Amino acid sequence: MQQTSAVPETMLEKREHSTRTRIYLGILVLVWLVVYIPGMVHRGLLDDADSVHAEAAREMVLSHDWVTLHADGIRYLEKAPLMYWCVAACYKLFGVTEWSTRLPIALSVLALAWVIFLLGRLAYGELGGFYSALIVETCIGIYLFTRFLIPDVMVTLWLALGLYLFLRGFEQANASRWLWWGFAVTVALNVLTKSLIGLVFPAAAIGLFLILTGNLRYLRKMHLGSGILIFLAVAAPWHILAALRNPPHPPEKGFLWFYFINEQFLRYLNERIPHDYGKVPLVLFWGLLLVFLFPWSAFLLQALRRIPYRLKSFASGLDAVGRANLLFALWAGFIMVFFSFSSRQEYYSLPALPALALLIGGWLARESASEPGSPPRRTAQVSSWILLAIGVTAFVVTMALVALSKPVPPGTDIADLLTQHPKDYVLSMGHVLDLTLSAFGAFHGPLLGTGLAFLAGTALNWYFRRRGSPFRGNLALGGMMVVFLLCVNSGLRIFEPVISSKRLALDINKVYQPGDIIVIHGDYEDGSTLNFYTGHQVEILNGREADLWYGSLFPDAPHIFLNNDSFARLWKGPNRVFLFTDLDRESGALRGIDPKTVYPFAREGGKVLLTNRPIGQPSADGKPQ
């Protein structure tokens, strides 16, 4: 009887396990759809990295050159190609659109959540995997730094997948060599995504893990010989072709020097040429982790306490959970320490966030499995009180901003309501600091949604945890973040005129005629959306630096760089010229230009388009323009 009853019981457990898996994955897919799909449409690409990278992918399709990147016709040698290949492939399949530009990054987030679910399930069980993936999908940091086209979430994906394969193989008695070959492929793909850190990060995390656990000899089981061959087979061809197609042409030193020495080593040492970037203060770099992981950072301290830190415990042996905790801690810790000694932006911490999400997710699963009144339940209630205080404060602040700021009349240029702080633009989100009380009048909808979501979400979390249901409390926090991130997306659309020049580009498209010339005053990145949305090469006034500097040294570089004298001659010539400049730098752009020949064309977001002849006036060939 016992034997016959055991069989259906096992089948029932498997069925329940399969049902839970489907439910968890269904929730994760639904959250991704609700949060990430709206951000793919109805929002223009941003000036700077977002549209520069999109333009490089667009020109890849046009030129059929999948080895050497170009932006505005200039060689763009500082980036690894994989993200651009993915975007260019989407352009080939779906056309050049905003949503096809963002599709690879959005899919990378979904894939990352799936990998983190697998990693969490391997380490902490199914619930731990679900919590960890939910944190990845709903934390602030990963959402913010997938709002523009940078490869960091893809770096994070390959790193997480590689460490999953490593941990899975390490925990098996006789791991298949396919696991280690798969690991080699993930490292190669990461090198093709963001160069040497794709190799350094997994090597450091695994190397430190094996040293601390006394398992350095385990390297022999990882099939390193064949793995290195596979790594080279995937990663080496592009590097070889790029070096051959971009050899040194004095004064420039070719691809290898610029890509490896300048962009990797000198950038790390804060000595990169040109020095056109800032450095986030170290305290802020670390402190922002709490913001990027919010609201789940309320449980970070409890999660960190689960990390083994005594050398004696390493020597005596750790259980599977302890080993996973150690690996995840080394993963996050190495990345944060690595960038603590380098030039850094706040988004450099993004690859560390999933490791911390795993630690938090594992602790949340432990809390859910613990008895009422146990230490995990009590400390979680303390965290819920902290979150409730933050939620109430956020509600009061957002409601006060709504009450104190007047609604903005339709058609108002939001740039007129801002106070610029250029020194803060070292931060990726530095423009947020330009907001004034008057400007908040344009954000009443997102403010109301944020305040209500924070109040309801933190209150429900507190209530459910008081009632002994941490699972429902965590779902409440996840739902709160879904609403908040949708409000962030809405806010970005309102703020778009300041950080994107899309609408100015579309204004040009309405009247553009063959022979017209578009000129950006300052750095190319200041108005790079003009290049992307018009599809025409732009010329640069007093801006031979930043992304285009090195490529401009090659002998085949197009002659698109102007100074004030050459621009004055162009302005007087037979072709219509559109000049793009910031309002506060307009006088510098028009130095030596007769004011009577300057005609305003369009203005938005603190930027202006000027032209050298009224719209509709015949050109030199007699055709209306």
Image (tube, helix red, strand yellow):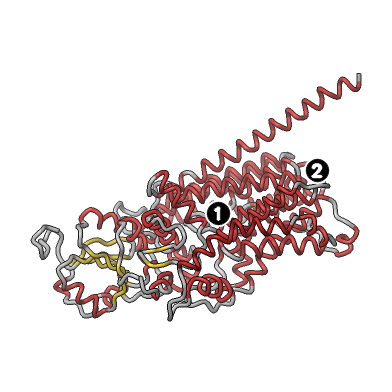
Q: Is residue 266 left or right of 416 when viewed as pictured? A: right
Question: Residue at the top extreme?
Answer: 1
| Numbered disc 2: secondary structure | loop
Q: Position of residue 358 (x, y in %)?
A: 70, 51
Q: Position of residue 406 (x, y in %)?
A: 37, 55
The crowd level at tag 1 (other Cα within 10 Å; few <14, some 14-19, many 20+) is some
Identify the residue at image location x=29%, y=59%: 536
Asked if 521 appears above or below 147 in the picture, the reply is below
Separation of residues labelled 1 and 2 (CA atoms)? 31 Å
Identify the residue at image location x=74%, y=60%: 206
Asked whether 53 or 63 is in front, the reply is 63
Q: Position of residue 205 (x, y in %)?
A: 72, 61
**Residue holding disc 2:** 370
Asked if 335 appears above or below 443 in the picture, the reply is below
Quarter containing the N terminus:
top right
Kind of residue sitting beneath label 2 = Ser
The crowd level at tag 2 (other Cα within 10 Å; few <14, some 14-19, many 20+) is few
> Image quarter for residue 62?
bottom left
Q: Which mark is residue 394?
A: 1
| Numbered disc 1: secondary structure | helix
Identify the mark nearer the N-term, 1 or 2. 2
Q: Position of residue 264 (x, y in %)?
A: 57, 71
Identify the residue at image location x=60%, y=36%: 26
